[in-house]
Amino acid sequence: MEASEACRLLMRRPWLWSGRDDAAIEAVHRFEDEVRSLVRDLQWRLVVEPDTVRLSKSPPLRSGERLLFEASVCLWMWLCVAAIEQLPFVTRTADLVSGAREVAGEAEIVCTGSLEELRRLRCGIEMLCERGVVEVLDGTLEELEDPDVSALLKLRHDRMLWLVANAGPLHADGTWMVDPLAEPREWIEGCAAEAGTGARVLRRLVDDTVVHWADLSLPEAHWLRTQLDGKVAEVAEALGMWVEERAEGVALVLDGEHAALQGHSFPQRGTLQHAAVLTRDYVLASGRTDGAGCPGPGWRAVAAESVGEQLARWARTHRWWSDAYRFNIPLLVLEVRKFWTRLGLLRVACGYIDTWWLSPATARWAGPCPMVSATNENEGRVGT
């Protein structure tokens, strides 16, 4: 069980640094053989050092809208990375934001200064904090632009190259075989190496809530069906999980008792989470099961307009909801849409009237939910 917990922890947090993740680093060292066996099956790379553990992994292919939501935040993370190269070891958040906007201007990316842009900037900096590239020495990330009250940051320039997940083959000591400074073109080409069919499917099982049959190519679907009792079961056992074959796809899940003990059930607190559950209940109860754009068996659809109407009705009756959402229904609709889309459980068919298609896997959350992906099992913002 401890070895499985160490594997699951590394799958969802591939950056472990001393001083922040000492217990996790010790667990990976203790069960290094088991972790490396799992990583080999997934065709990822693992670097284990006394004070650092880095799992070089990248997410599987996502749907267009899901990728768009993630890319809008990742864009600002990379703009901050480019700005960090020109900043000193210790700096203010305001200087980092100013530098990121200068880089954006050089790349001909329009900066609006809107609240949404600031939110994405903040999320990008938080992503760098999660990866150990930025450390907050004093203050918080609430204020980004005012130099008098913005946070004091410590920048770890030595960790920036670890941000590239698939940076070509490595030597045994973790250094690259191709020098990115001497051979940049060859190094970039090495970053795009494609994994085998089995590894691609296993990565989706580990990273995604459910692997839907409709999202797999014919070779991938055939491999998954033939390996459910083979390699898939072995990976599930290594993660301390079990394989659930569903009409719409396949998922790796924790048993209900284990998930409840570790607090991995669906996050039921908060306006967004409550609104997402109510929307799920509405779609599953009144949605249709056929029509243009249906992703697969069991998916249910409603018009996007009806979702907005229902959320407006619930906002009037649930007065404890955040005013930021109660009095801005379009924002609430967008955030609920992002919530389910990031989990891979919502597809939107655009047309004269947009249609929301919700996966039948969401019905697993009718009560306390035992369903948890290996990567997101303890990540409240997605609540897998």
Image: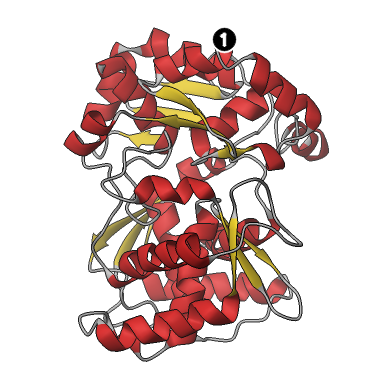
Tell me residue 252's x, y (percent): 46, 29
Q: Is residue 184 visible?
A: yes
User: Residue at horizontal 51%, vertical 45%?
Assistant: 160
Q: Amino acid at mark 1?
A: Gly
Helix, strand or loop at label 1? It is loop
For mark 1, what is the residue? 230
Q: Is residue 161 above or below residue 245?
A: below
User: Residue at horizontal 67%, vertical 81%?
Assistant: 110
**Residue nearest the viewer, comparing 197 with 223:** 223
Q: Locate the N terminus and report the quarter of the image it occupies.
A: top left
Tell me residue 19's x, y (percent): 23, 37
User: Residue at horizontal 50%, vertical 51%?
Assistant: 343
User: Residue at horizontal 28%, vertical 33%?
Assistant: 18
What residue occupies the far left of the structure in this picture?
A: 261
**Residue nearest the viewer, comparing 55 with 259:** 259
Q: Is residue 384 visible?
A: no
